[in-house]
Amino acid sequence: MANVTVLNGTMDEKEINGYIDIIEKENPSRKLDSLELTIDGDFVNMKYTFKPINFERIRRITGYLVGTMDRWNDAKTSEEHDRVKHSLSLD
């Protein structure tokens, strides 16, 4: 359950859950981490954050798309070690 804060007034649980439902429908693949609801007259301002997404970095090394090199044999690891690494210079 997300950490929910209501500012400038009070809000019942049903209304809070309504705002959570809106956010979750707009962002179905994300998990809500925190929600701040600020009551401003007839309006409610929402400020929210999501839990971090775990991802695996994929890069192209010696013609292969890889996440890690832990399953490479010695020859492929040596090929990666010997390659020329290019860097971008912004001078």
Image (tube, rainbow, N blue to C red):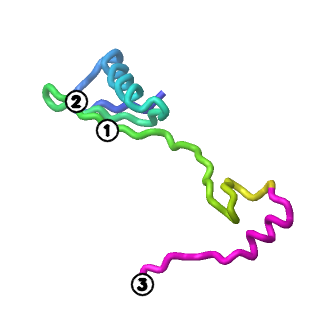
Task: Give the Cα distance between marks 3 and 1.
Answer: 40 Å
Confirm whether the magenta stretch covers residue 75. Answer: yes
What residue type is disc 3 on? Asp
Q: Counting other residues with Cα less than 10 Å from the Cα at mark 2, is it few (<14), some (14-19), or many (20 or more)? A: some
Residue occupied by mark 3: 91
Q: Is residue 38 found left or right of 53 in the rendered image?
A: left
Instruction: Give me the residue at 78% from left, 56% from top.
Output: 70
Secondary structure under badge 3? Answer: loop
Q: Is residue 66 above or below residue 48?
A: below
Q: Amino acid at mark 2?
A: Val
Write down the quadrant of residue 19 in the picture: top left
Q: Residue visible at 51% across and 43% down?
A: 52
Q: Residue at x 47, y 35 (%)?
A: 30
Residue beneath label 1, please? 47
CA–CA distance between discs 2 and 1? 10 Å
Q: Quadrant of residue 17?
A: top left
